[in-house]
Image (cartoon, helix red, strand yellow):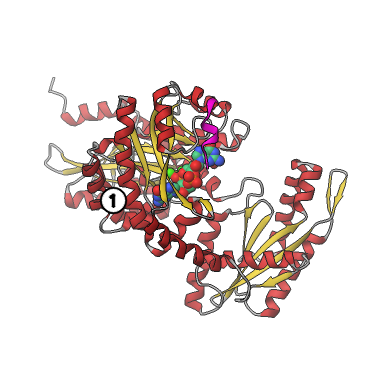
């Protein structure tokens, strides 16, 4: 009996493989398909002899041709994600393509397909949840910014202005407090629906806060147009809401800002429309106010704070607080996140949410960030001496800092100056930071990895980018955003998101920190789902270094919290 051909052996092996495997020629004709591949595509005829591309939707066929041609030309392996047609539906697959020379000395291609539909569905679900308000299903603030940026881009091209209108329900708080949250929620859902019906399809309606909606109105710019639209918005909310046996009367105040007259970026446009809405509320409600320069809005306020910040740098008014990151199971402190504080002589503790965005705009963040990185590293050294064991320090890196040319020097300086090992350092960045310039990000991240510093994705789930970057970049940690933990264990939707993130992390070999854990029930929820690390008020608020040191001496966490740590938060 002749020795079996290598190719037959190979095909036999493939038959047993769990993946869908094809051998194809350079034109993409199937020479052989594994059993899994045949079942999947459920082809009535033998797959051999058919074109692999015929099993793809038309839009995905060019991507397949490109990768096959590429592998044939370069002889280097390639990969592509695309959809395969199965009898029931289209399924996402990752196809890995490599080439080999067969016995007849011809170059052939091996295509191994892995089912990615679960990942894609998770991705889609996360994306939807991260960009929509759960109650009304309207876009949230994140998606709103995105939409406004798109409208700005098209307004630039067409030269036609547009307006942003903020709609606040008058008297909502009374309804919510007096009749209870379920009725309040029903009012919000109905209000959202009525507003949506009043607007055109090309308008965007988002829910941005408890009782606040924002409408983006492309092409609505003149006074007459604005009056017409906002008049309708107010009127639709004035007709009574019939819920259960209640008849509820509400009203609405509207504020409007115009592009480009009042502002040319999305943040300012919304802030100014908001300021105008406050003005409408102050001056009698149930009306619309268009922003005017004389109105005092957030920008003027920021200017004085900005001036004070430069002063504060000179006076050394910035300091770092440290929040413990604990093991969910043993509850032992594993590390700390360094969080910046500004101790202003008259304003008191100014929260970072107020001053970091300003520092980010004027560039002061580079200075503050360099200082906080170095100070945090030095502090960790001291923490370790007290604890007599290794800990890690997690430091926030802002987008502008990350893009700064000097960032790697700053990092090296902090490591050298403190004498820490790179691996004791975690750098927290957001998805947004990575996505501004992925090519640059990739190069910086790989240099961070050379220094052994770990990368954590902060506020994970709130960004709106593709999850594909998790594979592309050397990331070690995902920090589940506080907004997904807050309503646990009650909220099914948040539970689904947390489970999806934990699942994703497990498959990608990443560790997870759940942020904002405030209750024992939340901690247990996370622990039961193998979330390794916890950070939140339950196990410690951000605290000054000397209090953190006392906590380290105590070792177990719960005890310290019930003693005096609750009082140290500013
Ligand atoms: P972040 O990085 O998401 O930090 C976590 C925030 O959640 C902190 O707010 C922390 O005090 C708060 N937090 C932690 N546990 C709980 C909890 O159980 N419940 C609640 N309600 N909140 C909790 P903080 O300190 O006000 O910082 C706000 C943000 O400012 C940070 O969000 C971060 O984005 C930024 N930030 C703070 N320090 C720095 C810094 O040194 N550099 C940069 N670039 N950004 C910083
Ligand atoms: Ca953080
Ligand atoms: Ca965070």
Of 455 and 91, the residue lying toward us: 455
Locate the N terminus and report the quarter of the image it occupies: top left
Q: Is residue 519 magenta?
A: no
Location of residue 361 in the rendering, given as x and y in whole percent from the top left corner: 42, 63
Location of residue 116 in the rendering, given as x and y in whole percent from the top left corner: 41, 39
Give residue 112's quadrant in the image.
Answer: top left
Q: Is residue 87 above or below residue 142?
A: above
Q: Residues within 10 Å of mark 1 (few under 14, many from 20)?
A: some
Asked if one can make out residue 482 in the rendered structure from this viewpoint, the answer is no
Under circle 1, the secondary element is helix
Location of residue 480 in the rendering, given as x and y in whole percent from the top left corner: 47, 39
Q: Which residues make up the magenta segment? A: 563-570
Left or right of 273: which side holds 8?
left
Which residue: 42% across, 58% down?
312
Which residue: 73% across, 64% down?
281
Left or right of 321: which side holds 224?
right
Location of residue 106 in the rendering, given as x and y in whole percent from the top left corner: 14, 43
Q: Is residue 43 above or below residue 241?
A: above
Of 419 and 225, the residue lying toward us: 419
Of 333 and 196, the residue lying toward us: 333
Asked if one can make out residue 389 in the rendered structure from this viewpoint, the answer is yes
Left or right of 131: which side holds 366?
left
Give residue 551's quadrant in the image.
Answer: top left
Q: Circle 1 sits on which residue?
A: 442
Give residue 530's quadrant in the image.
Answer: top left
């Amino acid at each position: 009996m002749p020795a079996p051909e290598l190719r037959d052996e190979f095909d036999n092996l493939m038959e047993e493989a769990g993946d869908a495997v094809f051998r194809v020629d350079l034109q993409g004709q199937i020479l052989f398909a594994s059993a899994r591949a045949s079942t999947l595509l459920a082809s009535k005829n033998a797959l051999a002899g058919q074109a692999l591309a015929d099993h793809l939707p038309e839009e995905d066929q060019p991507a397949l041709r490109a990768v096959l041609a590429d592998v044939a030309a370069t002889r280097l392996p390639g990969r592509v994600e695309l959809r395969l047609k199965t009898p029931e539906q289209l399924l996402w697959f990752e196809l890995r393509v490599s080439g080999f020379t067969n016995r007849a000395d011809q170059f052939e291609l091996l295509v191994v397909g892995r089912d990615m539909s679960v990942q894609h569905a998770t991705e889609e679900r996360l994306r939807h949840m991260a960009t929509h308000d759960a109650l009304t299903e309207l876009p949230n603030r994140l998606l709103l910014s995105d939409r406004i940026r798109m409208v700005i881009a098209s307004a630039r091209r067409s030269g036609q202005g547009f307006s942003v209108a903020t709609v606040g329900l008058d008297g909502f708080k009374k309804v919510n407090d007096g009749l209870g949250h379920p009725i309040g929620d029903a009012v919000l859902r109905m209000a959202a629906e009525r507003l949506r019906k009043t607007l055109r399809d090309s308008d965007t309606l988002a829910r941005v806060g408890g009782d606040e909606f924002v409408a983006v109105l492309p092409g609505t710019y003149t006074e007459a147009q604005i009056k017409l639209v906002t008049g309708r918005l107010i009127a639709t909310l004035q007709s009574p809401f019939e819920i259960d046996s209640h008849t509820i009367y509400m009203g609405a105040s509207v504020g409007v800002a115009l592009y480009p007259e009042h502002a040319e970026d999305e943040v300012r446009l919304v802030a100014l429309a908001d300021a105008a809405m406050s003005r409408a509320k102050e001056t009698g409600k149930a009306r619309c106010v268009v922003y005017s320069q004389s109105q005092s809005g957030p920008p003027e306020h920021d200017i004085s704070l900005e001036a004070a910040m430069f002063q504060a740098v000179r006076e050394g008014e910035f300091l770092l607080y440290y929040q413990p990151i604990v093991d969910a199971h043993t509850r032992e402190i594993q590390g700390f996140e360094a969080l910046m504080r500004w101790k202003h002589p008259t304003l008191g503790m100014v929260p970072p949410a107020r001053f970091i965005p300003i520092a980010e705009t004027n560039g002061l963040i580079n200075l503050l960030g360099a200082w906080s990185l170095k100070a945090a590293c030095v502090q960790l050294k001291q923490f370790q001496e007290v604890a007599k064991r290794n800990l890690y320090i997690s430091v926030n890196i802002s987008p502008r800092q990350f893009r700064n040319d000097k960032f790697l020097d700053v990092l090296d300086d902090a490591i050298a100056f403190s004498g820490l090992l790179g691996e004791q350092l975690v750098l927290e960045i957001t998805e947004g930071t990575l996505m501004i310039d992925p090519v640059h990000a990739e190069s910086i991240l790989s240099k961070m990895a050379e220094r052994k510093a770990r990368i954590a994705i902060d506020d994970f789930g709130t960004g709106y980018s593709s999850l594909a970057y998790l594979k592309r970049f050397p990331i070690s940690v995902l920090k589940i955003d506080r907004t997904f933990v807050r309503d646990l264990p009650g909220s099914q939707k948040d539970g689904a998101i947390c489970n999806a993130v934990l699942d994703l992390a497990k498959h990608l070999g990443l560790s997870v920190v759940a942020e904002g854990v405030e209750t024992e029930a939340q901690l247990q929820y996370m622990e039961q789902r193998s979330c390794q690390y916890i950070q939140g008020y339950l196990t410690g608020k951000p605290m000054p270094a000397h209090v953190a040191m006392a906590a380290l001496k105590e070792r177990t966490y719960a005890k310290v919290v019930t003693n005096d740590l609750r009082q140290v938060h500013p």
